[in-house]
Image: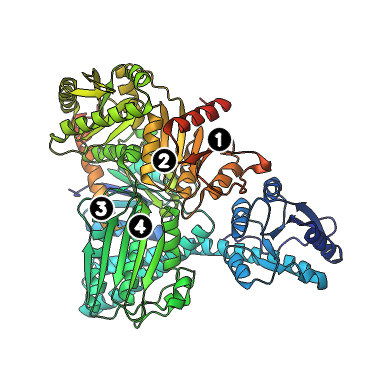
Amino acid sequence: MEILNPNPRRPDASHPIRALLIEDAAEDAQLVREALASQQDLPIELLHADRLSTGLARLTEGGVDVILLDLVLPDSQGLETLLKVRHHAPRVPVVILTASDDEAVAVQALQQGAQDHLVKASLQTSRHLLGRSIRYAIERHRVERLKDEFVNTVSHELRTPLSTIQEFTGILFDQISGPLTDEQREYLAIIRSNIERLTRMIDNLLDMARIDAGHAVLRKAVTEIEPLVELTVQSIRPLAKNKGIELEVQVPDELPPLYADADKVTQVLINLLSNAIKFTSGPGRVTVSVSEGESDLAFRVADTGIGIAEDDVPKLFEKFSRVQQHAAGDEGTRGTGLGLAISKRLVELHGGRIGVASRLGQGSTFTFTLPKYHETELFHELFQAGIEKAKQQQGRFSIVVLSVQNFQALRARCGAAETARLLNEVEGALRGVVRRRDGGDLVLRWRRGEMVVVLAEADRDGAQAMAARVKRVLEQRPFTVGSETLRLPFLVVTATYPDEGTTELELLRLTERRLQQPAQAKGRIMVVDDEAKIRQLLRQALELQDYDVFTAASGPDALEQLRRQPVDLVLLDLMMPVMDGYEVYHLIKENPKTKEIPVIIVTAKGERKDRQLGINGAAYNYVAKPFEIETLLAKVREVLVQQPVKP
Amino acid sequence: MAEGRKILVVDDEQQLALAVKIRLQSRGYQVSTANDGQQALAAIEAEQPDLVILDVLMPVMDGYSCMREINSRYGRGKIPIIILTARDRMKDLFDLEGIADYVVKPFDHEDLLTRIDRALKQRDAERKAAPPA
């Protein structure tokens, strides 16, 4: 078992501690210099930056042992400053320098990852405090890292013997190695349930360590909500039944598919459900409900239990919170105290939020939201899911692609807005034709003048029959183009899995060849906005101009996608919950992989102009809401021209 | 279905391999085990199993190298391979071509049995369609 070397390097004159001071006030910087100079026994090399951007740039070079950080800087304010520093250099301890003795700020800073805090004024009278803070911060940071490594390693090591115990207990319990008496079975059942408890606790610890270290990865896929909720409820039903608690499920029929990590969402739901049951003494009721909002899907777990005191609510989602640990009544319900903290992190990683409404004695309602995606944003995922299903069932899967002939000419004639309206009309007509086919999935997506229909379980003949019908019906139907009404010529082609191709790329390329249309996109653009309607609008407008568009509903989502595939431009909304645009902007610009990508900020009119975003004072591109589509398109073209599209 | 079918279980955790063996035997399969990729190849040569369950993380020769070696010696997909991978190493699944299926540890034994069943059925269907020369 490898553990990080517990013995730190001792600082001496030839290896001084390199401290980076990020402070804009000259007098305060001088105070720090003098305090450090008076420390004979602590060799420190002091670096100084007077704004955050310079400080972050210096951190990129590496070799800094500790950061002394003033939270109020010309290019960044408050705890946001700390967050940015932590994101940028997660392995360097931070000492916050505060102007006044503000306890609240200090506590928050410590919770957000700072190792210590120091009131600047105290340096006037007690210089040694700075040296002390630095030593403490470095030591504390070292211990934190040791803890993380330990938890990780030990969790892995513990899992293997636990698996073995679990396997053989199962073999005994299932009477594979011989019959058992009732008593023996009962005892084995107790052993099994405790193994499960242990496994859960280790999983929790490991989860938390991974999330803390920033390693948690979401594996998102398109998921049906109803089966997910149903399965989760089923697994918890025995627990509820034992306590005489009624479980109610309210999931509406018509819900859009969920694009999320199903395992993690299930984890959160189970956490909330088991808490609800834990804190409700029978008889009582726990209700699970899902509702659709403008831009998100809300999951609610309401119970008629003991409720939560107002004072306890703020700390509820913190690690090892006392409120969670003192569970009502029985053995085996006390957990690690990490459940809600993990749930919060998992929800936020999806770009969602979690909260609670409760009154002592009257029960609680926990709600978490997840971003809602339109099916056209999930084209790739739905395509993959279709191929997967066909593969598993050893069946076929087809796409039908239709295109308006002479689309380019049409678009030039009508302009962006009118073309979009016309294509919506075509889409409506197409949906009408396809819907008459019984069974099968249906996804429509506009992609540079083409519309793709996905047909599940259709072989080549079936797809071609559908294509023929589509062409016939649409060519007979008159469409409104500007002030005229006329018939449009269509090209319709098909591609079938696995006969004609085995990947999404192959199938789409094949159809492009068959349509004999130039398929080069003018560029790849990522749209980041929490509002589903805006994403739709921008996607449509950009796709019709021959851009390939990717959408993200939150900062974490955008960053994850950017990690996997490069884009030529990012359109970024500033006002987003969970992780706001500023933070996303900084993370993009500070990552060597993505810092060259131009970003256009979408701001609301009247945004505080004094909040600068530029690294080294560089200006940034922006478009103010509400905007005309043409304005945005012009800006996009302008920015892309300055930075040529990479092949 | 399982009668007479031979399965080779390869995992460096001998006790876990034993547990899987006991489970599979209780369903009528004939099972042998190996503890690393090299041993696995020798066992396949000697016993001609109908299916191989292969752990990814092993010393001497890891699961992926072993899988590629099996496919190269006996023809791709001729011997169905089910990979066992730990939950945090899902990134190992960069090459799904060449394996019949994968199972994530810790796994549910019923799930594994279902996948074995499916892989064997698939192999039977392929053999029928294109009988070996």
Left or right of A132, for residue A208 = left
How dense is the environment of label 3, judged by Cα within 10 Å: few (below 14), some, or many (20 and up)? some
* A512 to the left or right of B117: right
Q: Which residue is mark 3?
A: B113
Residue A22: quarter of image: bottom right
User: Dot 1 falls on which chain?
Assistant: A
Q: Residues within 10 Å of mark 1 (few under 14, many from 20)?
A: many
Q: Chain of mark 3?
A: B
Foreground tag (3 vs 4): 4
Marks 1/2: CA–CA distance: 16 Å
Q: Earlier in the sequence, mark 4 or mark 1?
A: 4
Of all chains, the one bearing label 2 is: A
Is tag 1's residue or tag 2's residue first in the polypeptide sequence?
A: 2
Say which of marks 1 and 3 sits in front.
Answer: 1
Question: Chain letter of disc 4?
Answer: A
In the rendered image, which quarter contains the N terminus of chain A? bottom right
Q: Amino acid at mark 4?
A: Val
